[in-house]
Image (cartoon, rainbow, N blue to C red):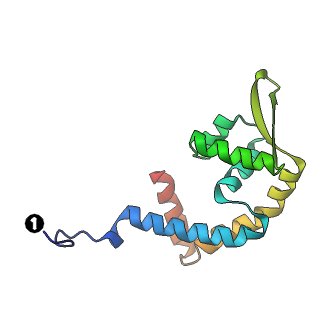
Amino acid sequence: MAEPGEAGYALEAQVGHLLRRAHQRATAIFLAAMQEHQVTPTQWAALAKLREEGSLSQNHLGRLTAMDPATIQGVSRRLIARKLVCRQADPDDRRRAVLRLTEDGERLVDGLYGAAFGISQDTLAPLSETERETFLSMLRRLS
């Protein structure tokens, strides 16, 4: 039987491991920047997408932010509890509910755009501008 490492496998060289480490770095930078606002990465994704798109069904918001139904349900519930998001009847189909930002939610998102841009800059700080563009292009292809 081969010993670990004999087949040339090194965890540190595997794409999944490297992506997880990069994600940990991005998350740590995000949490440090958003700590005083008590916004998680998934909450920010939902808030920013609602600001961009306006009213959305919870299901559609989940798809646009790459969250499974259970995750987007929990995120929505917490944002509603904080009065950053409200649920209302869809004006086009009263049987359906949509989520939208409240005025407090809009103010919060508008006030945090600068921090959000800074998080991206800090996360990519070790890379040159050319490397950043290449890296982001490759990530878009993988996702």
Q: Secondary structure at mark 1?
A: loop
Q: Is residue 43 above or below residue 38?
A: above
Using the rendered view, name the quadrant where residue 112 is placed.
bottom right
Q: Quadrant of residue 86?
A: top right
* Residue 1 in sight in this render: yes
Give the x, y percent position of residue 88: 82, 32
Identify the residue at horizontal 68%, vertical 60% (top origin).
40
Horizontal side, residue 143 vs residue 114: left or right: left
In the displayed structure image, the side of residue 110 where residue 71 appears, left or right: left
Q: Would residue 72 be found to the left or right of residue 95 on screen? A: left
The residue pinned by badge 1 equals 1
What amino acid type is highlighted by mark number 1?
A: Met
Q: Residues within 10 Å of mark 1 (few under 14, many from 20)?
A: few
Residue 109, given in percent of the width and then of the height, sits at 80, 56
Q: State left or right for residue 47 relative to residue 19.
A: right
Tell me which residue sits at (73%, 36%) in the image: 56
- Percent x, y for residue 54? 78, 41
* Residue 51 in view in this figure: no
User: Image quadrant of residue 26?
Assistant: bottom right
Q: Nearer the viewer, residue 142 or 22?
A: 22
Kindly give the residue lying farthest to the left in the view shown. 1
